[in-house]
Image: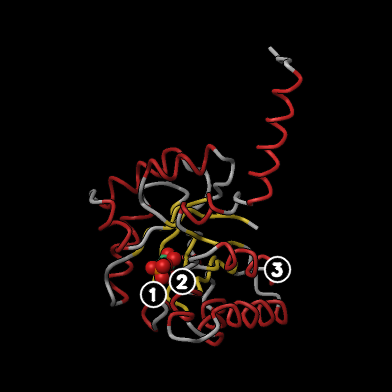
Amino acid sequence: MKFFADTADVAEIREIKDMGLLDGVTTNPSLIAKAGRPFKEVVAEICSFVEGPVSAEVAALDFDGMIREGNILRKIAKNIAIKVPLTVEGLKACKVFSSEGTMVNVTLCFSANQALLAAKAGATFISPFVGRLDDINIDGMELISEIRQIYDNYDYDTNILAASIRTANHIRQAALIGADYATAPPAVLKGLVKHPLTDKGIESFLADWKKTGQTIV
Ligand code: G3P
């Protein structure tokens, strides 16, 4: 499974990269607002040290506006994925960008039928929002399973990018189902390393090592 860092915080992205976990980055208008930096500037900085896809979202809701904004965003770097919302206009823009060889991330997906449309429009990534479905008592993972089955039934090569990931359990479940990617806040990605038995094991090994009175260096 590939991991994207779901953040526009450059320091956090660098840390995930140093851990060897980083396959790309996703941003959205809320994350850009949180970073408190000019959109194009921060996206360009992210692209300067991230090799994988970096999603940058259009703000326009109409087709012409999405094309105008996407044309500006995709000039920032070769690894930009234009993020468009799952609307009629967004699908039209997806079709244009993908047919021109630009990666497209279709976002705000909440149903299997929406995901089917995104694949037909040539999306590189579909972003089903797991956590936001869980928030309204609908099982977000069920959606990931349905999309996996549909894409496999018809051999769509659109990548399932599990988004709105809030917990380590979300990542485990999405990986078991076979989501191609997960995008998660850096804290969630870093949290995957934690296990109380690992900490306990380190503690007892260290105590025994001290008893030997030896040093390695
Ligand atoms: O990238 C968009 C998505 O991951 C947002 O997550 O937690 O705001 O629902 P969240």
On the picture, is 124 further left or further right than 164?
A: right
| Residue 155 sits in quarter | bottom right
Q: Nearer the viewer, residue 34 or 39?
A: 34
Q: Residue furthest front?
A: 211
Could you classify mark 2 by the number of other residues whose Cα lies within 10 Å: few (under 14), some (14-19), or many (20 or more)? many
| Residue 19 sits in quarter | top right
Q: Tell me the kind of residue under disc 3.
A: Leu
Residue identified by numbered label 3 = 176
Position of 90 relative to 53 (above/below): below
Q: Nearer the viewer, residue 153 or 189?
A: 189
Residue 139 picture location, percent across and down: 55, 83
Could you classify mark 3 by the number of other residues whose Cα lies within 10 Å: few (under 14), some (14-19), or many (20 or more)? few
Residue identified by numbered label 1 = 85
- Label 1–label 2 contact, CB within 8 A: yes
Image quadrant where one finds the N terminus:
bottom right
- Label 3–label 1 contact, CB within 8 A: no
Label 3 vs 2, first from the N-terminus: 2
Label 1 vs 2, first from the N-terminus: 1
Foreground disc of the pair 3, 2: 3
Residue 123 picture location, percent across and down: 52, 70
Helix, strand or loop at label 1? It is strand
Residue identified by numbered label 2 = 106
Tally the marks.
Answer: 3
On the picture, is 23 further left or further right than 48?
A: right
Helix, strand or loop at label 3? It is helix
Q: Residue at x 59, y 78 (%)?
A: 141
